[in-house]
Amino acid sequence: MRKSFIPIRFYIVAIVFLTTYINYTTRSNMSISLPAMVNPLKKNSVPQCKENDPEGYNKTITDTGTKYDWNQNVQGLILAAYFYGYLLGSIPSGIIAEWMGPLKTLFIATLIAGIFNSLCVWSAQWHWGALFFMRFIIGVTGGLVYPALQCLIGRWAPPQERGKFVSALMGNTLGTCLSWIIVGAVTREWKWPWGFHVMSIQIIFYLIILVIFTADSPEEHKWIDEEELKFIKESQAGQVSKTKAVPPYKAIFSSFPFWTLTILHFGNLWGLYVQITAVPKFMKEIIGFDIRQSGFLSSLPHLMRLILGIGYGILGDWLKKAKFSRTVVLKSFVLLSHIVPGILMASMSLVGCNAVAGLVLLILSMSINGAAVLTNLSNPTDLAPNFAGTIFSIISFIGGMTGFIVPSITATFINVFGENTKAWSYNFTLGGIVYCGCGIFFIIFGTSQIQPWNEKKEDGPTTSN
């Protein structure tokens, strides 16, 4: 083993960040590509906020490739397809990652996602149902990613540095930012099929980096030195078991603290998916920005979420070293991860056609929500570090339902009220109510106390760790 200038565990932090970035490029690229793939439901339709200058708006329309006559219901199903698959992939993801290893799980899942992402181009030419299937498979692979990362973090992160590791999960916001910017620009210049292919090409480079720099555990990494290995293992003493064991599902599902976490995560994902799946449509079809503008402006809230999320993670580690109560810190930051963003999201119903006001509210709502790195994203490790991957797979399954609920509700509001600010006002108001309601419930009933079912029974085969 050779001594590395940079601690190997920080390579793992970078891998966690890069993995979530890649995961969200294939998760969110459909939201920016879909408006370029479909014909307007009405010929020469003009966004509500551009009705006073229809000629000026029409001059900004560009040729983005072949168009399909898919109504709002079909578009809603296509956007929801990923999340149907995500639900299915989440069910076994914890056990798969714990038994097969996070490295192999991440490699196989991401490779399949890259292949099927490019196949979306040809499937759309055949039938929207074929495109739905491709997105469904990509969703299945996406459901494996976060529980695998929880396993990786659990094996590598010293408790006093866990905030930094969890904040690396904010790579998903950069994935959203850059995919919307890149896909928007590529679609404008080379038409929408290349918006898919560019995302698949970068996956190739990611897989090479993943294999070179990642190992399932510190003991298995070929570059780690004895000093760092000793530091990690001594820091984790008594918290991370080397025993493989079947998760205590009965105890988990009968645990009230687990359900408070589940509700908290559900609310966070509802708000997040409103941003990912609804904002591009709102920016283009109501405010009236073209694809490049929609991609760039819609990415700003996520970019700020990334910056503040990393800052929250560093702050969380400092508060732990300063001996602040974890429960107090957890519930205090729920105000930032859920309550304040919920109020700001609901306030979107008041902006009408004011693009500046809308952008300000979206940026504030999304950036402040970066505090989730200290709330619903880290609470699984609080409750049961030995089964954090399993817990996250369950709450991802339940919370992932919002991924198809939100697009379906968005489509329903548009069908009932039309493509206007009234429909979107209801959509944003509902998102704010869910955000706040779930946060308040957790503040009242949630906890950070480790649960008795965290202990593994020493009756399974031991790992190679």
Image (spheres, rainbow, N blue to C red):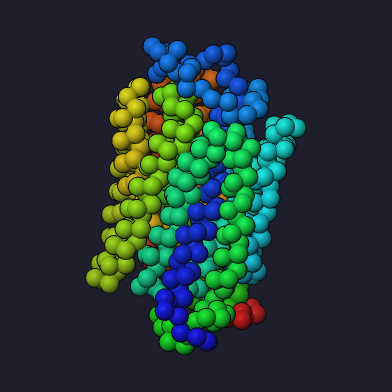
List x then y, in percent, for residue 63: 58, 26
List x then y, in percent, for residue 253: 54, 57
Say if 237 sits above or below 61 in the image. below
66 or 341: nearer the viewer? 66
Q: Residue furthest right?
A: 126
Q: Is residue 259 visible?
A: no
Q: Residue placed at 54% from the left, 20% from the top?
A: 415
List x then y, in percent, for residue 350: 31, 25
434 or 359: nearer the viewer? 359
445 or 138: nearer the viewer? 138
Q: Is residue 168 left or right of residue 197?
A: left
Q: Residue placed at 43% from the left, 32% from the top?
A: 293
Q: Residue placed at 32% from the left, 53% from the top?
A: 308
Q: Is residue 240 left or right of residue 322?
A: right
Splitting the image into 4 quarters, where does residue 382 fall?
A: bottom left
List x then y, in percent, for residue 339: 32, 43
Q: Is residue 377 visible?
A: yes
Q: Residue placed at 55% from the left, 39% from the top?
A: 186
Say if 347 sits above or below 60 in the image. below
Say if 199 sits above or below 379 in the image. above
Say if 396 sits above or below 40 in the image. below
In this rendering, the count of numbered labels is 0
Q: Is residue 283 left or right of residue 342?
A: right
Quadrant into which the C terminus falls: bottom right
Q: Is residue 327 left or right of residue 14?
A: left
Splitting the image into 4 quarters, where does residue 62 fall?
A: top right
246 or 123: nearer the viewer? 123
